[in-house]
Image (cartoon, grey):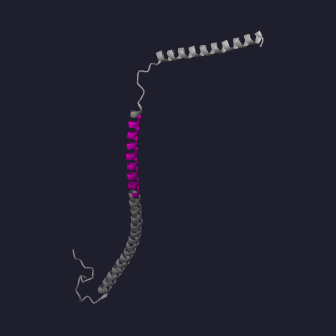
Amino acid sequence: MTAKAYLRRLLVTIGIAGSLMAAGVTIRAASIWAATDAPLTVAPVSVSSVQAALDQERVRSSALEAQLASLGSSAEDLRAALDAAQAQVVTDRTTADQLRASLTAAQHKLTTLQAALRAAARRATVTSGAGTGTTGGSGGGDDGGGHDD
């Protein structure tokens, strides 16, 4: 080895050592600066307190799952009740349609009967007016109308 190579290796080693020392000083200065600007006034959370909080959250989660299951069964009950109510509405609608048709038929029959009664009353009036007049009645015979109040 020549003296020139030896000197070059010595200078590189001193440069590397100096760089490492400068880096160490920089890191130390940064840690001191961070410690003064952001002091640790609150102690870090202990593992036991984190474990206790985790246990509490697990209990809460279990309770919420139980409530969710209860709500699910309640929703199923409500869905079944709604289906039953809808079926009853369909039945009621069918019954109402049948009753409407029956009412329409009864009204039509009533109208026909009323027309027949009027026609019978006219015939009775015409026959009693065309008679000999010896009946002397005022047309107050029983017309089958039944006036039971």
Q: Main secondary structure of the magenta part?
A: helix
The reply, left or right, for residue 128 in relation to residue 45 is left
Residue 55 % position (x, y): 39, 40
* Residue 61 vertical placement versus 93 (above, below): above
Q: Name the one closer to the observer, 78 or 34.
A: 34
Q: Which sits in the foreground, 148 or 143?
A: 148
Residue located 27% across and 90% down the image? 132
Q: Nearer the viewer, residue 9 or 50?
A: 9
Give the magenta-colored segment's residue range.
50-76
Q: Is residue 58 left or right of residue 124?
A: right
Left or right placement of residue 128 versus residue 58 in this view? left
Quarter of the picture holding the N terminus: top right
Query: In this orientation, which residue lies closer to the viewer: 132 or 6?
Result: 6
Q: Position of residue 77 (x, y in %)?
A: 38, 58
- Residue at 35% in and 76% down: 110
Q: How far across and how far down the image is residue 52, in percent? A: 38, 37
Residue 70 is covered by the magenta coloring: yes
Confirm whether the magenta stretch covers residue 65.
yes
The residue drawn where x is 40% and y is 60% is: 80
**Quarter holding residue 8:** top right
Q: Residue at x 53, y 15 (%)?
A: 28
Residue farthest front in this picture: 1
Q: Quadrant of residue 78?
A: bottom left
Q: Position of residue 118 (x, y in %)?
A: 34, 79
Above or below: residue 6 compared with residue 69: above
Q: Quadrant of the C terminus?
A: bottom left
